[in-house]
Image: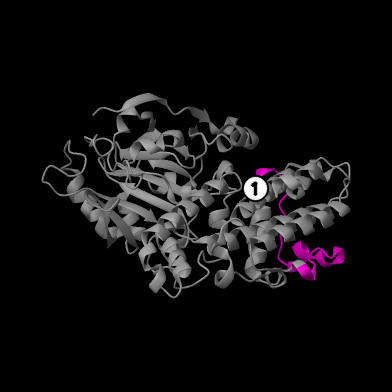
Amino acid sequence: MGLRIGGEIEKENGDELSYSDFVERYLMKNRPVVLRGLMDGWRACKDWVTHTGQPNLEFFSTHFGKSIVQVADCGTREFTDQKRMEMSVAEFIDHWLKDSANYHVNATTNEHGKPLVYLKDWHFVKEYPEYLAYTTPLFFRDDWLNLYLDNYSMHNEPDACQEKNEISCSDYRFVYMGAKGTWTPLHADVFRSYSWSANVCGKKKWLFLPPSQSHLVFDRNMKSSVYNICEDVNEAKFPGFKKAVWLECIQEQDEIIFVPSGWYHQVHNLEDTISINHNWFNAYNLSWVWDLLLKDYNEAKEYIEDVRDICDDFEGLCQRNLAANTGMNFCDFFIFIACFSFANLVQLYHLHRVNENPSWCLFPKAQHLALNLLSAQKIVLKMKTVDALAGDHALLLDLRKMMDDSKFLELCSGLDRTYRGIHKEQQQNYDKKETLMDGLGDLDFIVKSCSQIYAPEDLVSFIDSAVKKLSRAFNRESPLLPELDELRSPDAQ
């Protein structure tokens, strides 16, 4: 069955695109794009590529050969993905060198029938933090996911997931390496996050399906999806597949592709390829994350419904299964949202304190922080309707203690550096806690009645109270106030 190709992904010169243009045209509209001109000066483009444009495999063996990585067998399916195995980088490269010369037309094996292997999800930045292989492009720096994981664990309960569970990982910044013919099956990204993928060398073919058509690649019960769209697809099992209209993209060396939330895609390496990939989310796609969590939670609950009567903690079991299968559960996500809500309020108040200019609310950073709060508030309001965070599974977050936590200060400082970079403000050094936190108590910013969070409604009340206090300190003529007041409007409740 041939694919219906409806068009191609557009390509832009990234150095001619402003951050606000990228947000308006791609983030907010959830549209893919290929960006050029953003990889100049990357160390990876020099060290990892030979003078002929091929992967410098000898460099990897010499400098990173002892690293243990996940390698996919492109010829063997295991559940919804390719079979994974562990090996050292040196072993993987030996495999590559022995087999790539024998590559044949078959997309999954060489001509001797040995499966092609594809190094995936290598946490290179975490493993080699002092080796600065690249700089995250400006458009992708508002990355709440990796900033959070640089300071906190995703899981509130240590036993929520097994220690080596691939989803429960330290960050979502990866290196991929694969010979010509390696590929990745059809999927939508973890957490329904955004992702970006930079081709350090080589060429990839991407096939995209917009979210509005994602149901077409599922079976009649919406339980399983097509594995490989380039093979014959069973029309009886997937009756809608032939109606799908795909977008195609050939990604060249030194190009970066932005993958929006919820877009199913399949990727093939047309040449020997090395890429750098990040998964990330922020205020613009938090709703995608919550929608996925809620869907997966309902499926997890339905799957084990028959043991409800004999289970001492049925809800706890649902949440543990959700964390294991999706990568986080309701509790994890709520703590994440609460942390960033508080961090954005701290940033907003600090911005007010350090600016004598009465028009400071016009600053892009202030508007950005207000948008973040609006987005977080909307998600928390949705979480209020779910009973799973009540009763025995209620939370306890002490915001006063959070202020004293060095990890929270690091997160606030990282958020501040991110937005100063995005909005081209002068960078400052926050070596001391007082620099960022000083003065919060002067306005009774954190009141005793709102300092402890047990459930979503408490976080709603806290943000509401904090916004009221901030509003009394702000210029009433400020254009920021309508944005903040929207948080407290009856319609938002």
Find numbered disc 1 in the image and state the secondary structure of the residue it sits on. Answer: helix
Residue 442: within the magenta? yes
User: Left of 108 or right of it: where is 214?
Assistant: right
Which residue is rendered at x = 44% and y = 47% of the image?
277
- Quadrant of residue 272 within the rendered picture: top left
* Residue found at x 44% / y 73%: 159
Is 224 contained in the magenta span?
A: no
Q: Magenta segment, which residues?
A: 422-449
- The answer to whether residue 1 is visible is yes
Q: Could one spot residue 134 in this view of the protein?
A: no
Q: Which residue is mark 1?
A: 375
Q: Is residue 319 left or right of residue 54?
A: right
Furthest residue toward top = 6
Return the residue found at the far left. 112
Q: Identify the amino acid type marked 1.
A: Ser
- Find residue 250 and report its horizontal and vertical position in percent: 37, 31
Q: Position of residue 22 (x, y in %)?
A: 59, 35
User: From what the image shows, is residue 402 above or below residue 208?
Assistant: below
Q: Position of residue 240 (x, y in %)?
A: 32, 33
- Report the side of 48 relative to 294 (left or right): left
Nearer to the camera, 92 or 332: 332
The one nearer the camera, 6 or 307, is 307
Name the spot of residue 81 as percent of width and height, x first.
30, 51
Which of the pair 332/179 is nearer the observer?
332
